[in-house]
Image: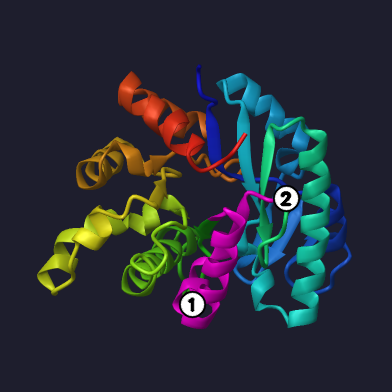
């Protein structure tokens, strides 16, 4: 049986969320094709965040399934609790409807907290720095047989920083800290919980030797079969280093579409050869996402 090709890192907005953001007066909010967050104001293609474009791209690249999430970089978790809960509910209810209408091609990650019927939950990297929250998340997700997907939250670039600072520096630093927190407090306690770190955990695989030099038992990192890294935004050199560190079973494909062009990352994966690309695009993800 040929396994499905799965993209584990895409962002998809139900129409209800776009409407809720358009009605807001404070960040995050939408004004036409402009999105304002705590990081600034950006042009955004709302059609690219919609279901029709998502399915078209999946078809064009030969993917059967996308695991979609609400990007924590919007900064919703930083809002007052009632505001955040309202937006999360709008998203979760809307994306559940989209997934139900997509005949199994869309699996959704809940925003805010785990929910029944979802593949798991997407949290900002900073969530893993709170041991009390991690315990609640890990226990509930394990009980539900769902996955924990860790994604960067909003950046805080210094004054005068260039546009690439937040995604290039802040996001990767957040993810390395989240990965370190999981090594310190989670990897041994919840060995059955699948955890997926976006963007190669900010390049955390590159830090293994330094961690070892500082007394970390890196066998906890290299031997943790339930910890995965998605490939979004990285090229062949980074992926080869990750493969050399963790082996082929720990990488999963993530495009980060529509933020990034999925064709670029897919061509990089395919260039690694059929055995490796099948593992990243099919086998490893199939172990995480039930049909």
Q: Which of 268 and 62 is in front in this view?
A: 62
Residue 290 sits above or below residue 56 on the image:
below
Q: Residues within 10 Å of mark 1 (few under 14, many from 20)?
A: few
In the rendered structure, the answer to whether residue 218 lies left or right of residue 190 reads: left
Going by the picture, which residue comes out furthest to the front?
A: 143
Query: Which quadrant of the figure has residue 78?
Result: bottom right
For marks 1 and 2 on the same chain, the one whose residue lies earlier in the sequence: 2
The quarter holding residue 122 reads bottom right
Front residue of 139 and 228 = 139
Q: State the residue in front, 15 or 114.
A: 114
Please name the residue shown 25% across and 53% down the image: 223
**Image location (x, y in percent) of residue 11:** 64, 47
Dominant secondary structure of the residues highlighted in magenta in the image: helix
Residue at disc 2, secondary structure: loop
Residue at the (35%, 65%) spot, across then down = 187
Could one spot residue 261 in this view of the protein?
A: no
The circle on residue 159 is 1
Quadrant that contains the C terminus: top right
- What is the basis of the colouring in this image? rainbow
Residue 183 seen in the current view: yes
Select label 1 or label 2 by which is in front.
Answer: 2
Hey, which residue is sitting farthest top in the picture?
1
- Magenta residue check for 274: no
Marks 1/2 in contact by CB < 8 Å: the verdict is no
Which mark is on residue 117?
2
Tell me the residue at 44%/34% (across/down): 265
Magenta stretch bounds: 118-147
Instruction: Say whether residue 222 is left or right of residue 39.
Output: left
Query: x%, y% of residue 158?
Result: 46, 76
* Percent coordinates x, y for residue 191 in the rendering: 39, 60
Between marks 1 and 2, how big is the CA–CA gap?
43 Å
């Amino acid at each position: 049986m040929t396994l499905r090709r799965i993209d584990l890192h895409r962002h998809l907005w139900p129409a209800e969320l776009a409407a809720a953001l358009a009605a807001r007066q404070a960040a995050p909010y939408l004004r036409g094709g402009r999105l304002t967050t705590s990081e600034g104001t950006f042009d955004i293609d709302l059609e690219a965040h919609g279901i029709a474009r998502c399915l078209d791209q999946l078809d064009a690249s030969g993917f059967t399934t996308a695991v979609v999430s609400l990007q924590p970089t919007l900064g919703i978790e930083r809002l007052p609790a009632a505001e955040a809960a309202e937006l999360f509910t709008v998203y979760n209810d809307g994306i559940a409807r989209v997934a139900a209408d997509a005949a199994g091609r869309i699996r959704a990650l809940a925003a805010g907290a785990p929910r029944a019927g979802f593949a798991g939950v997407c949290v900002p990297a900073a969530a893993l720095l709170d041991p009390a929250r991690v315990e609640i998340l890990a226990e509930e997700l394990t009980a539900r047989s769902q996955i924990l997907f860790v994604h960067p939250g909003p950046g805080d670039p210094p004054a005068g920083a260039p546009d690439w600072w937040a995604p290039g520096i802040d996001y990767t630093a957040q993810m390395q800290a989240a990965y370190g927190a999981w090594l310190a407090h989670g990897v041994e306690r919840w060995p059955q919980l699948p955890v997926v770190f976006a963007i190669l955990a900010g390049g955390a695989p590159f830090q293994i030797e330094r961690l070892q030099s500082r007394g970390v038992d890196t066998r906890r990192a290299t031997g943790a079969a339930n910890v995965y890294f998605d490939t979004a935004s990285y090229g062949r050199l980074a992926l080869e280093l990750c493969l050399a560190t963790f082996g082929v079973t720990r990488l999963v494909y993530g495009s980060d579409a529509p933020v990034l062009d999925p064709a670029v990352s897919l061509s990089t994966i395919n260039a690694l050869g059929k055995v490796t690309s099948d593992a990243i695009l099919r086998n490893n993800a199939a172990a995480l996402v039930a049909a």
